[in-house]
Amino acid sequence: MATVQVSEAEKVYILHGIRDDLRADGRGCEDYRHMEIETDVVSNTDGSARVTLGHTAVLVGIKAEIGKPRPLVPNEGYLEFFVDCSANATPEFEGRGGEELGIELSNMLYKVFNKHCLDLRSLCISEGEHCWLLYVDVLLLQCDGNLYDAISVAVKAALFNTKIPRVHISADEDGGKEIELSDDPYDCMRVDVENVPCIVTLCKIGHRHVVDATLQEKACSVASVLVSVTHSGSVTCTRKVGGGSLDPESIFEMIEAGKRVGKSLHAPLMKLLQQEESLGKRRQKVGFLG
Amino acid sequence: MHIVCVANANLQLLSLVGPFCAKFIPVCSYRTAEPLEYHRSFLKENCRPDGRDLSEFRTTTLNIGSISTADGSALVKIGNTTIICGIKAELANPTVESPDKGYIVPNVDLPPLCSSRFRSGPPSEQAQAASQFMADIIESSEVIRAEDLCIDRGKLCWVLYCDMMCLDYDGNILDACIIALMAALKNTQLPEVTINKETSAPEVKLEKKHGLTIQKHPVGSSFSVFDDSILIVDPTAEEEILSTAQLTVVTDEEGRLCSAHKPGGTSLSGEKLQECISRATARQKEIQKLIDKVLHSVKSAE
Amino acid sequence: MPTDNKRVRGPELSQSPALFACKAAPVAPQQGPRADGRQRDQVDVRPVFVRCGLVSQAKGSAYIEAGDTKLMCCVYGPKETERKDETDMKCGRLTTDMRFAPFSCPERGSWVQGSQDKDFSLMLHESLQPALCLHKYPRSQIDVNVVVLENSGSVLAHAVTCASLALADAGIEMYDLVLGCSIRQDGGSYVADPSYAEETYCSSDGASDQGRLTVAFLPSLNQISGLQSDGEMSAETLTAGVRTCIEGCYKLYPVLQQALIKAVRKAGPPPSES
C-alpha cells in the first residue's frame, strides 16, 4: 500500500498528540476527515458513487447482468467485486504493483457484503436458471489512507443508487421460459441497503486507537483492526491487518469503538443519500473536479 | 580448517574410516565440496552413502484411504520421498469421438513445499513430464478400461481426477507416483448412478458404492547411471543430480513391459537394459504384494 | 479463456456427483451434542496430533491432524531475498503460501490457486509475522509453505499453529509460538474448533449472531496476532468469542511444546561443551 516515510521526530509528535486526543490535523481520535459523497456519477452504469475522504478518492460503478446462479445456492443472485488500483493513485501501482492490494481489498469486500447484509434472494429471477449478478467495480483514484472505510461507504452509496430493470418471466409454447424486460425505463427494482455495513478501520497508535488514520499516522501504527458494522450495531466482519500484534483488551476496546463509530456513520449517510435522491434531476452535478 | 581436511582426506582416508562413518566431519565437508567424487568412492566399493547396495530399494511404506474427502487415496513413502494421491470422481459428458469412454486425468504436482528447487506458479517442466508419463502408463497398460467409466453411452460418464502431490522430494518420484496411483485406484469407491427415464437427469445413490475393476498392475523401477556404466536402483535426489542418465522401466504382473522411459543422458547397453527389466519384474511382485497386504489390513480393520 | 497445456486436462465441464444425490447430505445437528460427540458451548477442541521434522528437504517442517483436518507445513530459508528492489533490507522478509490439495475438500478444487487461497496466505502472513524476530535476518527471506491435505474445518487456525511449529523446527528465532483457534457462533450457542459441516452450515431462519471467528494468539506474551471474523454478531458475542478462542489456544499449547521437545531430542543430544 502507499506508504510514506516518517522521521522519528514526526512520530513522537503524532504519538504525543494522539495521547492527548488531538491529532495533527486538529481532529479527535474518533473523528473522520471531511467526506464527500456523490451518487449517479457515471451514466453508463446501473449505479455509481464517488467518495472522497480527505484526499482519498474512490469511484464505484455497479453493472447488473443476468447470469446463472451458483449451483449450491440456486435461489440467490450474487455480487462480484473487482478493485482496480489505478497507477493514477500512486506510482507504486504501476504495472502489476497494485494487483496484490486489489485482491486483498476485493476479498475483504466479498466477506463484508455477503448475504447477511443484502437480500440476495431478491436478485433471483428464476430458481436455478437466471439471477441478477451485480458486478461491483471499485476504482482507486487517489490514496491518502483509510481505503477500506472510503470504499465501503462508496459501495453502500452505489448499491443505494443501483436501479435494476424489472423483468417478467413468461412461458412460451414449449414450456420454456422467456425473460422479458420491462419497456418502461423507470420501472426498476432497488436494492435494500438498510442492512449494508460500513467498515471502520481503527489504527492502534501508542496506547490509543484512532479512526480514519492518515498515511502519516498509519506509519506510526503497528497494527489496525477493521470492523464492519451495520446500522443496528452488529458486527459482520473483523480482521486484524498489519505486521504487529495486539493484546486482547485493546482488541475488545477497538471492537467497541468501531461499533460506536460505525453505528453513528449510518444515519447521516442514509439521510444524505435520500436527500440527494429526492432532488432528482434538479440536482447540480459536481463531478470529480468540483 | 575443514578445507585443509578435505585436501588431506583423500580416498585412502575414506577407505580407512569406512563408508558408514558419515558423521565424521571431513567426510561431511567432502560430501559438500566434491559430491561426485564422494559418491564414486562408495560406488567403487559396491555400496552407497546411505548404506544400500547398488540394486537395493529404500524402504517402501504405504498408507491407503487416509483422506476421507477423496473417493480414493493413498500415501506412499520410498525412503524420504513422499507422494500422496487423491482421487476425486465427477460426472461429465463423454466426447463425441468416443461416446462410450470415461476420463482418467492424472496430474503430478511438485509444490514449493516438497523441495527448495520448485517455485510456486504453473507446473514446472519436471511436473509436466511426470504428469504426461503417468497419463501414458495409464493408457498403454490399460489399468482401467475407459469403457467401465461410462454410465450412459454418449451422455454421461465418470471423470477420475487423480492428483498426485509430492510432499517430500528425495528422488525417484515416478516409482512413488505409480504405487500411489495404483493403491488409490484400488481404494476408490464410486457411488451408484442411475438415469431417471423421465427427466433424463442422473440420480446418485451416495450410500451404495462399488469399487473399480483394475485390469493391470503396473509397477515402475527407476535407475540412475553413474559414469556411463554403473547402474544404481532407486536414486535419491542427490544421486539423480549427479548421475549421467536415468531410466524408468514399468512392467505389469505378467512381466510385460508397459513403458521404458529414458529421457536423454548417456547411452545404455542392451544387456544393462535387460538387467533393469528383470529387476523391475522382481520389484513388481514385491509392490503388488505390499499393496494387497495393506488393502487387506484396511479392509479387515473396517 | 486460455487453455492450460501444462497439465493433463479432463473434460471442459464436470460436476460433483453430490449435486445429483437422491438424499440430501445429513446436516449438522443444531442442538444437543455435536456429530462427533463433542460438547456445544464448551471449549471442546479436537485432540491434535502433531509431528515436527518430517520432510527431509525442508529446513523445518510440521504436520498437524485435528479430527480429519490434515495439514502440512514446510519452512525454507533464511535464504537470500528474491526481491532486490525492496528498500528496507534491515528486516527479513516472510513469504507465505497456502494451498489446498485438489482432493482436500468435499468439492474438488482447481489446480490454480484461487483468490480464497491467496486470502488465506495473507492472513497466515499477518498472524505469523508478529511472532518472528525478522530483524535478526537482514537481507534474507523465509518461505512458509502450507498444504491442506484434508479440509475438515478450522483450516486457517490449524495452519497458523502448524506453520509456527515448522518455523520453530527450522530454528527461526521467534518471540513466541503462534496458536490458532476458531469457533462457529450459531445463535445463542457456539461450537469450538468446528468441523467442515459445522463451519459451512447456514441457518435458514435468519437468526441473529451467526458467524465464524478465527484468532491467532501468542500465549506467553498474551498478544493476539491474527483476528478474522465474518457473519453477523453483536460486539458482545464477538468479544466472548475471542475469549473462547484464547482459551482454546491455551489447551493446545502443552501438546505443541511436547511435540517440539520430542523433535529436538530426536535431532540428537546437544553437542558437548568441549
Image (cartoon, helix red, strand yellow):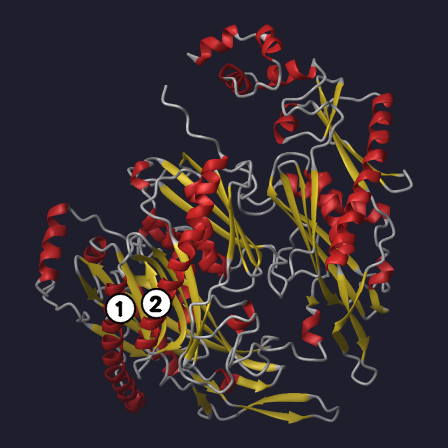
Q: Chain of mark 2?
A: C
**Quadrant occupied by the N terminus of chain A:** bottom left
Residue at 86% in and 48% down: B216
The image shows residue B98 at horizontal and vertical percentages of 85, 61
Q: Is residue C247 visible?
A: yes
User: Which residue matches tag 1?
Assistant: A252
Residues at marks 1 and 2 on the same chain: no
Q: Residues within 10 Å of mark 2 (few under 14, many from 20)?
A: many
Element type at mark 2: helix
The label shown at residue C8 is: none
Residue at 31% in and 55% down: A242
Pointer 1 and pointer 2: residues touching (CB < 8 Å)?
Answer: yes
User: Which residue matches tag 2?
Assistant: C242
Query: Mark 2 is on which residue type?
Result: Val
The answer to whether residue B167 is left or right of residue B63 is: left
**Quadrant occupied by the C terminus of chain A:** bottom left
Query: Mark 1 is on which residue type?
Result: Phe
